[in-house]
Image: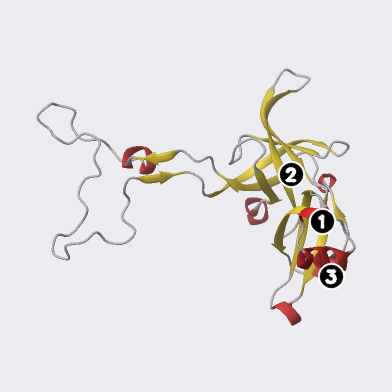
Amino acid sequence: MGRAIIGRKIGMTQIFEEDGRVHPVTVIEAGPCCVVQKKHTATDGYEAVQLGFGEIDKRRVSKPMAGHYAKANVKPSRHLKEFRIESADAYELGQEIKVDQWSVGDLVDVTGISRGKGFAGPMKRWNFSRGPMAHGSHYHRGVGSLGATAPARVFRGRKMAGRLGGTKATSLGLEVVKVDPERNLLMVRGSIPGATNGLVTIRDSVKAKAK
């Protein structure tokens, strides 16, 4: 994995170019993040860095976590995320990661927790087709057949009605339209998962690497 940062979804807006073209963009407050911990293959079995994002009162941090931050000589953070990389030696403890590591035209993947939509039926949740809508059908928006009758049970993994949303989701290959290093803002074309003020992680796009 290459560049990465933690951010907060602010909302959506539009950006107009000089020729009149308009881009629907999502505004993300990305960073600044501090490197809190480095992990190495020799000691931890893999290479990774742990980044901290957001301010928090030091009185709300437990003593073990306060020592964790003190070891890196950084202020306590509200959020911690770990990112796997090829080599953690490229980073230093306490190093500040900012949004200016990206430029216009770069492709990124944004991961967040999708909006929770409560209990939903199989048609809305799994895009099932409906049955005939005539009065004699007796089957309109139901879940349908649940499988074999011999075991007298429903097999694990059967798509049925249930809780929709509120799960980890990723938008792939979003283009960076504008970078504002002074306000730590990153604007990407299109929508990203989650509600306003939701926590997100931004990484270099896997699609860009495939090319």
Identify which residue is drawn at 28% across, 38% down. Answer: 129
Q: Is residue 90 visible?
A: yes
Amino acid beneath label 1 = Pro
Residue 51 screen position, x and y as percent:
77, 58
Q: Along the line of sight, which residue is nearer the eye, 38 or 210? A: 38
Using a 10 Å C-alpha cutoff, classify the residue at mark 2 as few (fewer than 14 neighbours), some (14 to 19) or many (20 or more). Answer: some
Identify the residue at image location x=75%, y=81%: 43
Task: Give the quarter of the figure containing the N terminus.
Answer: bottom right
Q: Are marks 3 and 1 in contact (CB under 8 Å)?
A: no
Q: CA distance from mark 3 to mark 2?
A: 24 Å
Task: Find residue 180 and report its horizontal and vertical position in percent.
Answer: 83, 36
200 vs 49, left or right, is left
Q: Which residue is mark 2?
A: 106
Q: Amino acid at mark 3?
A: Asp
- Tell me, for residue 76, which label it has, or none: 1
The tag earlier along the polypeptide, 3 or 2, is: 3
Q: Nearer the viewer, residue 176 or 79?
A: 79
Q: Amino acid at mark 2?
A: Asp
Picture coordinates of residue 56, whole percent (x, y) = 79, 49
Per the image, label 2 sits on a secondary structure element best described as: loop
Query: Earlier along the polypeptide chain: callout 3 or callout 1?
Result: 1
Q: Secondary structure at mark 3?
A: helix
Please give the label number shown on residue 210: none
In front: 15, or 63? Answer: 63
Q: Name which residue lies at 46% across and 38% down.
A: 117
The answer to whether one can see residue 92 in this image is no
Q: Which residue is mark 3?
A: 89
